[in-house]
Image: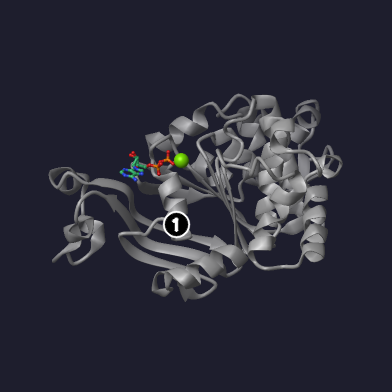
Amino acid sequence: MARPEPILTCEHVWKIFGKNAERIFDGVPSTSEITSEDLRAASLIGAVREATIEVAEGEIFIIMGLSGSGKSTLLRCLSRLIEPTTGVITFEGENLLTKSEKEMIQIRRHKMGMVFQHFALMPHLTVLGNVAFPLEVQGIDRNSRHQKAREVIDLVGLSDRESYYPRELSGGQQQRVGIARSLAVEPKIWFLDEPFSALDPLIRREMQDEFLRIQSVLSKTIVFITHDFNEAIRLADRIAIMKDGAIIQVGTPEELVRTPADSYVEEFTNDLTKSKVFTARSVMAPKDPSLPSGGSVPDSIKIEEIAAEIVASEQPYDVVDAQGNIVGQLAREAVIDVLVGN
Ligand SMILES: Nc1ncnc2c1ncn2[C@@H]1O[C@H](COP(=O)(O)OP(=O)(O)O)[C@@H](O)[C@H]1O
Ligand SMILES: [Mg+2]
């Protein structure tokens, strides 16, 4: 399936920390030639190295990697909260690196929503005041901004808390306020840096569900950072895996599980329940017309959801596409292979 045009791209982006970092590229024909050894020899830190990604309109693009792999630095480079050392960043067809700081402030204010793991709600403002704040900064009048703020507060399920102060809210509720605040300006792109990582596992799952529900309403373009592969799998359309500042692999959850680029990626996928990732289409065999069929399942359904039924069936199931055409068949042996992790 063809993806829509990218709305945000970064190409060959580097962020190197250290004195005179940019000089490391002097006389180097291609930035990709700089190695870890070069950086070490110059006492520099390559927080982001040669990163290239394309984020399509309306997709949930996850950047995932261990702590220290460069995720936050890359995300901040995308909005130029951190200045990349070199590279190109394009947003809505324009190179962001040619924008003045003033223009960047406007772009961030009007087009980018941001949520961080630890962010400060303003303690002296109510939920309503906090969520309306970015609109106040835009100079929007009180009535309009309160109306918009109430809309997004409702969206995150906090209508009954609108006059509460941050200290009167739980961690999960505060994070919802942060989410509502980031959505108040109706951003074109939504950046989230480990927004749920500080929450208890149960609350985290609830927030993930909530996030997916909100996204089903808003269809934003999203760049979401996590160090939790299970979270990535649950939320992502596509995942970019980062290691030591570099992007090792970009793919759908299924692609990463099926063909991990290296042992680092494979490690993440090891503990994963494969039946949550694989679809009927991805494990089906060609249809054998001589066999009677036990039933039919949609091609996009996850194995997890149909495993019990098919394992209990003597006959293979037909796999049908959205138009109702039979595109293959699924036998109980194939399903068992997925379940036992083959
Ligand atoms: N301001 C800075 N100065 C020097 N090194 C930094 C700075 N910010 C981040 N780093 C380093 O860059 C690397 C990537 O950090 P970060 O992007 O925060 O990783 P992640 O978000 O994946 O945990 C780390 O080694 C970190 O220590
Ligand atoms: Mg980080």
Look at the picture and state if 2 lies above or below 262: below
Q: Tell me, yes or no, if residue 133 can be seen here.
A: yes
Depth check, front residue: 319 or 232: 232
- Residue 51 falls in which quadrant of the image? bottom left
Q: How is the image coloured?
A: one colour
Depth check, front residue: 122 or 255: 122
Dot 1: what SS?
A: loop
- Left or right: 103 in relation to 320: left
- Distance from mark 1 CB to nearest ligand 1 atom below 8 Å: no
| Crowding near the residue tagged with mark 1, few <14, some 14–19, many ≥20 C-alpha atoms within 10 Å | some
Q: How many marks?
A: 1
Name the residue at 77% across, 49% down.
128
Q: Position of residue 280 (x, y in %)?
A: 70, 43
- Left or right: 118 in relation to 137: left
Look at the picture and state if 137 lies above or below 300: below
Depth check, front residue: 147 or 126: 126
Where is the C terminus found, in terms of image quarters? top right
Q: Position of residue 60 (x, y in %)?
A: 61, 52
Name the residue at 57% across, 70% down.
5
Q: Which residue is mark 1?
A: 81
Depth check, front residue: 200 or 50: 200
- Residue 331 falls in which quadrant of the image? top right
Q: Residue furthest front?
A: 124
Q: Position of residue 48 (x, y in %)?
A: 35, 50
Name the residue at 80% across, 65% down.
144
For badge 1, the amino acid type reads: Leu
Q: Position of residue 341 (x, y in %)?
A: 57, 27
Name the residue at 81% across, 30% down.
309
Where is the N terminus found, in terms of image quarters? bottom right
Q: Tell me, yes or no, if residue 329 can be seen here.
A: no
